[in-house]
Image: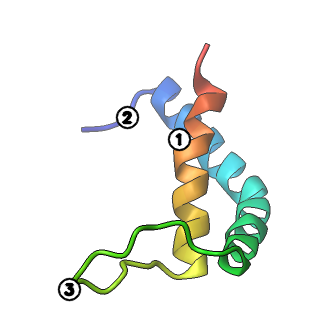
């Protein structure tokens, strides 16, 4: 399926915003590593943890769609 002009434009805008905001989310993810963990320990399971870079990307991808609402 070939994206329409508007879909293509929105995809480009999303990537630009992701690139521009990623350093801020990376800093936030790095700072979160220094805070004490609030997660409840799950008996018998190792805690699931992403890399700092993966966490920053997940934060950015979760927050950026709000820029397109409205």
Classify 59 as above or below 56. Answer: above
Residue located beneath label 3 in the image: 44
Left or right of 3 on screen, residue 35: right
Residue 16 locus on image (x, y percent): 69, 49
User: Callout 2: helix, strand or loop?
Assistant: loop
Q: Nearer the viewer, residue 52 or 16?
A: 52
Quarter of the figure with residue 49: bottom left
Mark 2 and mark 3 lie on one chain; the one further toward the N terminus is 2
The residue wearing badge 1 is 11
Front-most of residues 50 and 16? 50
Mark 1 or mark 3, earlier in chain:
1
**Which quadrant, please, contains the C terminus?**
top right
Separation of disc 2 and disc 3 at Cα?
Answer: 46 Å
Determine the residue positioned at 41% across, 27% down: 4
Residue to which mark 2 is pinned: 3
- Vertical position of residue 33 compared to residue 1: above or below: below
> Residue 29, image x and y in percent?
67, 69
Viewer-side label of 2, 1 = 1
**Residue at coordinates 69% horizontally, 70% vertically from top-left?**
32
Q: Are marks 2 and 1 in contact (CB under 8 Å)?
A: yes
Asked if labels 3 and 2 touch by Cβ distance under 8 angstroms, the answer is: no
| Distance in Å between CA atoms under marks 1 and 3 | 41 Å
């Amino acid at each position: 399926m070939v994206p329409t002009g508007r879909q293509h434009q929105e995809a480009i805008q999303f990537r630009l915003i992701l690139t521009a905001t990623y350093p801020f989310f990376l800093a936030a993810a790095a700072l979160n590593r220094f805070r004490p963990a609030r997660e409840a320990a799950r008996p018998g399971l190792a805690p699931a943890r992403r890399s700092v870079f993966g966490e920053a990307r997940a934060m950015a991808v979760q927050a950026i769609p709000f820029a397109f609402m409205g």
